[in-house]
Amino acid sequence: MNIFVGSLPFSIEEADLRESFEAYGTVDSVKVITDKFTGRSKGFGFVEMPVDAEAQKAIDELNGATVLGRTIVVNKSEPKPEGERRSFNNNRRNDSRGGYGNNRGGENRGNRGGY
């Protein structure tokens, strides 16, 4: 089972997170999500546990627990439906004028430069 762990302290290491979940059973993988530019933790991660009963016990007992002064959120990770994924270009509108929205570029703006 893939488990989402949120509200993590920014200083937590993957080894610390693994240790917390190994108290409930076998852990296949642990990933603390980090910012790709700074390398700093984003405050959430994922834990993969192969035995669903052990994973559910970990979720039940660790959800709401305090880790390094923060109350963490632990629940089963559900994949987002394909249509809900965020696009990084939704603020740009590629229209038939050849430009990107707000009449910038692509259209005839009159005689510029005398040609």
Image: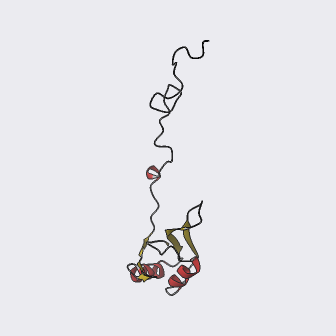
Q: Residue at x 44, y 55 (%)?
A: 81
Q: Residue at x 47, y 82 (%)?
A: 54
Whole-percent x and y of residue 32? 55, 71
In the figure, is residue 15 to the left or right of 43? right
Out of 46 and 50, give the one closest to the viewer.
Answer: 46
Q: Residue furthest top?
A: 115
In the figure, is residue 59 to the left or right of 20? left
| Numbered disc total | 0
Out of 84 and 88, give the one closest to the viewer.
Answer: 88
User: Does 69 appear above or below 80?
Assistant: below
Whole-percent x and y of residue 5? 46, 72
How has the structure been colored for display? secondary structure
Out of 49 and 51, give the one closest to the viewer.
Answer: 49
Q: Residue furthest bottom?
A: 23
Whole-percent x and y of residue 41? 54, 69
Q: Residue furthest right?
A: 115
Q: Residue furthest left?
A: 64
Residue 26: image quadrant is: bottom right
Q: Residue at x 47, y 52 (%)?
A: 85
Whole-percent x and y of residue 74? 42, 74
Q: Quadrant of the C terminus?
A: top right
User: Does 14 appear above or below 104?
Assistant: below
User: Does 66 appear above or below 30?
Assistant: below
